[in-house]
Amino acid sequence: MSWFLAAADDELTIYERSKPGRRAFVAPPLDVPERPLDALLPASVRRSEPARLPEVSEPEIVRHYNRLSKRNFDLDTGFYPLGSCTMKHNPKLHERVAALPGHCKLHPLQQPSHAQGALELMWRLQEALAEVAGLPHVSLQPSAGSHGELAGVLLTRALHEDHGEQRTKVLTPENAHGTNPATVTMAGYELVKVAIDAQGNVDLDDLRAKATAEVACLMLTNPSTLGLFEHGIEEIERIVHGVGATLYYDGANLNAIMGISRPGDMGFDIVHFNLHKSFTQPHGGGGPGAGPIAVSERIAPYLPHPQVVRLEPAENGAEPYFDLDFDRPKSIGRLRGFQGNYGVFVRSYAYIRSLGAAGLREASEVAVLNANYLLARLKREGVMEYLPEAYERLCMHEFVLSGAPMKRELEIRTLDLAKRLLDFGVHPPTVYFPLIVDEALLVEPTETETKETLDRFAEIVAEILREARDNPEVARSAPHTTPVRRLDEAAAARHLVLRQPL
Amino acid sequence: MTSYVSATDVDRREMLAAIGVGSIEELFADIPPALRLGRPLALDPGRSEQEVFDELRALAARNVSTEDEISFLGGGMYDHYIPALIDSIISRSEFLTPYTPYQPEISQGGLQAMFEYQTAISELTGLPVSNASVYEGPSAVGAAGYMAKAAGGGRARFVVSRGVHPHSRETLRTLAHAWGMEVAEAPLRDGVTHLPELDADVSAVIVQQPNFLGAVEDVAALAGAARDAGALTICACDPLPLALLKPPGECGVDVAVGEGQTLGNRLDYGGPSFGFFAATEALMRRLPGRIAGETRDVDGKRGFVLTLQTREQHIRREKATSNICTSQALNALAGVIYLSWLGRHGIVELAELMLQRTAYARDRLASIHGVQLLHEQPVVREFAIKLDVSVEHVVARCREQGVNPGYPLRADYPELADGLLVAITERRSRAEIDRLADVLEAAVAKQLEAYEEVKA
Amino acid sequence: MAEASYPDDLLYHPEHDWARVDGDHAVFGITWYAQDALGEVVFFDPPSVGTQLKKDESYTEVESVKAVSDVFAPLSGDIVEVNEALSEKPEMINEDPYGEGWLVRVKLADAAETASLMDSVAYEASLS
């Protein structure tokens, strides 16, 4: 980390930098006749004390947040192989186009006739996503992946209710991302878990046993959270559709198959995309993102409204007209305000236009190449002795290792390895997920990393393991070079301090 | 080389050799031939950066933004002046490109910013606990409903004021249907909420401050009635008016949520922005979303971590307080920078400026022949008028003059089909308000004339 | 508590809960194994006095930073007392799982149920 921060003690909060009388904001002058406050707002509804926001000048604010930023590791700075998150490069063009006033200063309640650029962009994005998914109808409304999941399960509910059926259960595999079961409950269903077999696939026998007429849906991701393509996907489709349930695709791992295989062709009825994963919306430290969904013909009537539609021109030569369609009697309604995260659509659309068909395919091919190469490289470094693959098969864009042998033999856990990686200027892979792998390490390099970066990562892991053989304490007490070292999360949970006392 | 990849032909050969396969194709062996797309995606070929830029600019040119007209549109999102320092800070790679802070040691910047944001929201709302943000306003209302359901011991009904944003009411209905819960609506009378008798089946009462028609509600009275019935009170609030209004926490509100766009975030045609979510201490463990907490490291240094994680989906899974994973960290960061920029006194000055200009605008418009106020409740930054003539025609005429006079209420409030919602921010100078009044007056007069001609 | 221990005056349930029987009352808690698997306990919200517990059913939860564990009733009965001190110091469950870390005290519904529980030797054997 930056040398000029290393000497600093605790970084003060903006409130601790505050001093009465300091200010940044200068209000425009009052240019209308001033009326007494009491005449406009009765005292009974007025605040007696101002909110204790900080009093700071602009230079202080800029310095404060600049200093804070330097206490963050980020993707533009270093390798970030966080499995399941698809930390691929965020193209800088996207910030430029998103900042065009025609896009970013457009009010959401602007009449559609005066927002044709935006509506056309959204329509074209819908079309592109439909093509990638292999499902014809898209809603851009959901704000994040889990929001898309919620939409998908609510659409399933609407479908079954429309057919006069009351189904009560939703299936997810036991290695599902936590948002899947949380979504099931939020959508008013009961969760049933399906086992994973020894090859890392959904256990078809267990699925057959649990796929009853009470089941509304199976939520799946393919490749799975283990980075493995479901061998039995065709049979899964038959089983699930055989009992009249819907098949939902969690798009978190779409980066492995763009232009190569399509969830719609696999038989999925509903697909969500994470635009902040495969489609390069910057992660922002934890949002914003977007979670659009693509659905089959039979699900389309239930899509949230408004839908962005294209109306064919009345006469030859006229321009098509793009509109927000509210006339959808079977729609589940709204899941949020306005039209969705348009700023994210602008960036993702720019990405798709930049890459085109061949570029998207290449992105997935190289994502899978990089993951398999990194795995091979780790093997060559002898890492597998302590961090074996959880499943010995071809991986796709990510792979899972188990730190169980490392824990037994070197007495350092996956957590310690992760913390020691921080000292080498690398973000650790995802740890302890999926839950079904003991001491899991989920590694996703993505396609935008160089071969040299992958080589270096493998070397670093090998070095940490060698170090642990001689002196496990170094990793166990890591990190050593970061602005703060290991933090007491138990104390944070026991003695909750969730805001600055003022 | 496209797609931002660096793998050269030489790289690829070496990598394939190391893996032990002859081609990239072999890496996809697990995908059965029947599931291979087998053709290129039906998308245009990729384009150069400058071509993509030109296309995006051409699309932008077909949008009429707040730079292209004098806009009085409001209804939950507002045209404010966003100070330059926000863009300069949030465009930094270190804030823009990292993921959620799963490794706190190298995420202190983001975690401390969350802590500072939570403090600011707690101050504004008067409630002790805030989370680190949710997606936006209406879904925050839905999330608050989910919280009330979990806390409600089986109570099966929400009572929501018709003054709550139409999108919030709709979102709540969509979710409540899945929960088997009923949503009853409390009507507006004279522009403010008229609560019916509440029985023991009411899980929560949901109100908005100021309400969608801009009116200041008596939140304390509404919360009191809810409490008497054993129901929670959820208040969706507009954060800038909270600089002047009694905060929800002092009115007996249990959960305060709201749309954060007005705090330093772009309009962006409706998103991304952020939703804020604050609650009483009693409800702390039921909060959805990420929460940052203070602690110490092994050397005794202060630091911040995500805490109370056992509420969340990655641990609690089907029993989580919400399914939310990605929140709106970058937008919330813009929010706390904006609140720091305004500062303790600046936010009051800004709100008072809007209050005075809104009062001025309201008086000027109400004095136009053919225009009346829809209600006479106190307002802060937004108010509703009704016209004696077709709102759609008047809006069209105003727009020809480069003024967008506001949001027609017909679509959301059929009973107020002649209504228009007018928002005033610090961007709308007196001169612009005077122009609105002139243009509106002329438009209404023309429209009245047109009716006379038709009658004649 | 740093080292595994399974006092021999207690009875043990396969879901890692113990019971100290005293006439027609009993005290329940979680075993050393359970608290070790959980990690540092950060939160325990006791159930209410008067709650009816059924043998083998979960009656409350214990939370660590990264996990939540169901706690199972080794025997049936009504809660007559809960360990309020754990609200302030939940870490007692780790430090003294059989003493200060007790969870609830119940009036037993059916003393004969004790026959189905294991003694310390059998329980410890079941852990390997």
Image: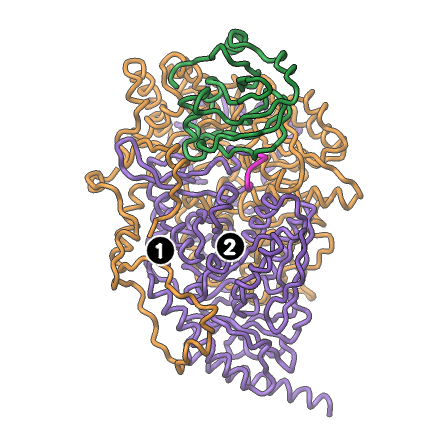
Quadrant hosting residue A179: top right
Check the image and report above or below for A81 versus B96: above
- Residue beneath disc 1: B337
Give the drawing colour for chain C.
green
* Crowd class of label 2 (few under 14; some 14 to 19; many from 20; radius 10 Å): many
Could you tell me which residue is drawn at 57 percent across and 62 percent down?
A: B222
Could you tell me which residue is drawn at 63 percent across and 27 percent down?
A: A193
Question: Of A398 and A333, which appears nearest the observer?
Answer: A333
Q: Is B322 colored magenta in this rendering?
A: yes
The first of marks 2 and 1 along the sequence is 2
Give the drawing colour for chain A.
orange
> Amino acid type of disc 1?
Ile
Q: Which chain is purple?
A: B
Badge number at residue A397:
none
Check the image and report above or below for A91 versus B455: above
Residue A138, given in percent of the width and then of the height, sits at 63, 48
Q: Secondary structure at mark 2?
A: strand
Check the image and report above or below for A398 versus B334: above
Could you tell me which residue is drawn at 59 percent across and 54 percent down?
A: A123
The boundaries of the magenta stretch are B317-323
Q: Is B187 colored magenta in this rendering?
A: no
Residue farthest toward the right in the current orientation of the protein: A164
Residue farthest toward the front in the current orientation of the protein: C23
